[in-house]
Amino acid sequence: MSDLFLLPSHQQPIPTHPHPPSPTQREREDVVSFEEQLTALSKLVKAGKIRHIGLSNESPYGVMKFLETARVLGMEEVVSVQNCYNLLYRNEMDMGLSEVCSPAHEDMGILCYSPMAGGVLSGKYMFKGRASEARLNRFPGYMARYRTLQSQDCVFEYKEIASRYGLTMGQLALGWVYSRPFVTSTIVGATSVDQLRENLDALNTPIFSQVVHDLSEVFMRYRDPSRTFARVLDDGDTGTDERVR
């Protein structure tokens, strides 16, 4: 039995990456209806094959439509949504899903994945040659949205904040996500024991209000760096011949 079955987005194009869908891609007709999806999943719940239904990479509209459909038809309601959330990609969560899922509204769990932005927020991609075997360098183009010039500028400023408060980049990035009041759980990954230890240590890293204030100031200057159309940087390229920070 699966405790939580996660259903991908409702299949209409959702601009979660830098390039929004073209006008001809904005609406699709070959999608499975909300009713059909919930009917199938409700049967699995009743059969004892899954306990709960969750959503993944879903928009506020999709979440509300699944809930509305379930309530009108008397089917199983979705209980959580799993979406990307980190210091480089936070607009959708902060300005939409967090309100929908709050205890005062729909009271749904929020599961956040990629809290380290594919490792970019560790700072290991900031200097040439230091992460030659890391996955974003081994697979050019993978998670390129986090390798834009504006994203890199943002990471440099976050590194300054981490240094100012005696934190590692991992403690800052993970501790911030862990501290968000609407986050139910965080999905982390590790390729070494040291990375796993830092992931766990961040649970006990206090993110004081002044740290949040400093992070917010950077956010106000770089509102959505992962969706810019600026050029993508290669291994360790900072966009200038010599980066001075």
Image (cartoon, helix red, strand yellow):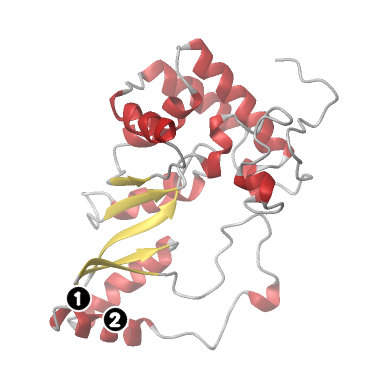
- Image quadrant in which the C terminus is located: top right
Q: Residues within 10 Å of mark 1 (few under 14, many from 20)?
A: many
Q: Amino acid at mark 2?
A: Leu
Asked which secondary structure carries label 2, the reply is: helix
Q: Are marks 1 and 2 in contact (CB under 8 Å)?
A: yes
Give me the residue at 19% from left, 75% from top.
76
- Whether residue 76 appears in this view of the structure is yes
Disc 1 residue type (three-letter): Glu
Q: Is residue 73 above or below residue 168?
A: below
Q: CA distance from mark 1 to mark 2?
A: 7 Å
Horizontal placement of 211 versus 238: left or right?
left
Mark 1 sits on what residue? Answer: 76
Quarter of image, res 223: top right
Q: x, y percentage for residue 153?
A: 68, 29
Residue depicted at 59% across the width and 61% down the height: 15
Q: Position of residue 115 (x, y in %)?
A: 45, 42
Q: Nearer the viewer, residue 101 or 55?
A: 55
Circle nearer the N terminus (1, 2): 2
Q: Secondary structure at mark 1?
A: loop
Image location (x, y in percent) of residue 204: 28, 24
Q: Which mark is residue 38?
A: 2
Indicate the quadrant where residue 165 lies.
top left
